[in-house]
Image (tube, rainbow, N blue to C red):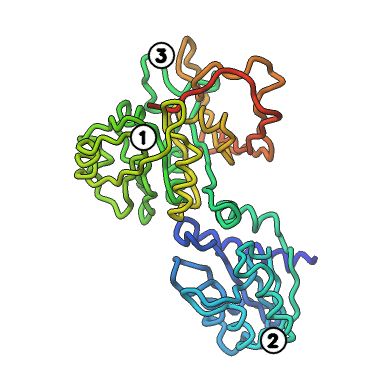
Amino acid sequence: MSDWHLKMMRQALALARRGLGKTSPNPAVGCVIVRDGAVVGRGWHKKAGTPHAEVHALKEAGELAAGADVYVTLEPCAHFGKTPPCARALIAAKVGRVYVGMVDPNPLVAGSGIEMLREAGIEVETGLLEKECRELNRPFIKWIQSKLPYVVLKSALTLDGKSATASGDSRWVTSDRARREVHRLRGNMDAIMVGVGTVFKDDPLLTCRLPGGKDPLRVVVDTSLRIPLHAALLGVKSSAKTLVATCSKDAARSDAVAGRGAEILVCRERDGRVDLADLFEKLGALGVQSILLEGGSHLAGAALRAGLIDRCMIFLAPKLVGGAGMGLFAGEGVALMGDAIRLEEMTVKRVGVDLLVVGTPVIPEPVQGSRIDVQR
């Protein structure tokens, strides 16, 4: 594939990223239309229920779409949903060729859009920058295939592995720039999750505090429904909801928390705590495709050991705490280094003075060792 085609698909990917966090439960998609070596149409999916990327690009291109090349990050849809099929729109515009980044894993599409285009005599090539296109929509791909959310663990640590000092102070581990990056990440996720211990300790808002940013659904894991009624996240003014996952059947307490604006989600109990697998299944059924797991150490440890984390994003600050400060995961951990959970698909980049380490956790075998409890 020529550098020109790669350049055009990269432009489509850049457009698609503008929709991240706003299109769920639909994927983020970008489209570029090129005729006679010039870009004549650009578009991206801006919000669920609104026109798709191809429609915006075709509108901008107008009559110049006829005979043009189309670069789209995801296979054009072929079914009627809240909007008409994009494959038919491309056919009606009489485009020349379509370059597709990846086939849509949605069973309602799954190659039918490509087939429709080819039956109409339009040449289609697939797999252009497929890895990058799949990376863009990891949450959508996992959810559409399993109905489970894609879980990203985010944490901030000093170079000696501390998330807080021995006294519990954690403000702030990382720089302002790293914290802005976290708020950008929050705006791209469907939900943000913490244990109730974090609510007691930090009283967080769990919002995206960037101009124009989207607040995620706030989820608190609270087995015994101990959340303080004066908690900041219960009174925050936001378009997003607060959901408290619990095993408690105390109707009076549930009514009191609900009276502060939260929704109560009763989950299955496992070893006296909220069963995270059951919680994630319930969230997936509600259409939640992505979760940012922010704290605390018991919740993070339980999710990791249960194999429920899809990606780790760890900010490392150039600081040393020393002593018995707090770490990322609670519990004893594995006994042998050979049983350690590895990170693969690793990337490392500078974010201000901090480092951001991103990787996919891989558990070599069923890990032996003590149970790590979920935050009560």
Mark 2, other Cα within 10 Å: few <14 / some 14–19 / many ≥20: some
Above or below for 345 versus 199: below
Q: Nearer the viewer, residue 228 or 44?
A: 228
Q: Would you name the residue on which mark 1 appears?
A: 247
Q: Would you name the residue on which mark 2 appears?
A: 67
Q: Are marks 2 and 3 in contact (CB under 8 Å)?
A: no
At label 3, which amino acid type do we have?
Answer: Ala
* Separation of residues labelled 2 and 1 (CA atoms): 60 Å
Task: Check disc 2 and report its element: helix, strand or loop.
Answer: loop
Mark 3, other Cα within 10 Å: few <14 / some 14–19 / many ≥20: some
Q: Are marks 1 and 3 in contact (CB under 8 Å)?
A: no
The numbered disc on residue 166 is 3
Above or below for 109 versus 169: below
Q: Earlier in the sequence, mark 2 or mark 1?
A: 2
Mark 2 or 3, closer to the camera: 3
Task: Check disc 1 and report its element: helix, strand or loop.
Answer: loop
* Separation of residues labelled 1 and 3 (CA atoms): 31 Å
Q: Which quarter of the rendering shows the C terminus? A: top left
Residue 34, how many percent across, how many down?
A: 66, 77
Q: Which quarter of the rendering shows the N terminus? A: bottom right
Q: In the image, is 8 to the left or to the right of 248?
A: right
Residue 80, how many percent across, how many down?
A: 53, 77
* Separation of residues labelled 2 and 3 (CA atoms): 66 Å
At label 2, which amino acid type do we have?
Answer: Gly
Residue 357, how many percent across, how many down?
A: 59, 35
Q: Earlier in the sequence, mark 1 or mark 3?
A: 3
Q: Earlier in the sequence, mark 2 or mark 3?
A: 2
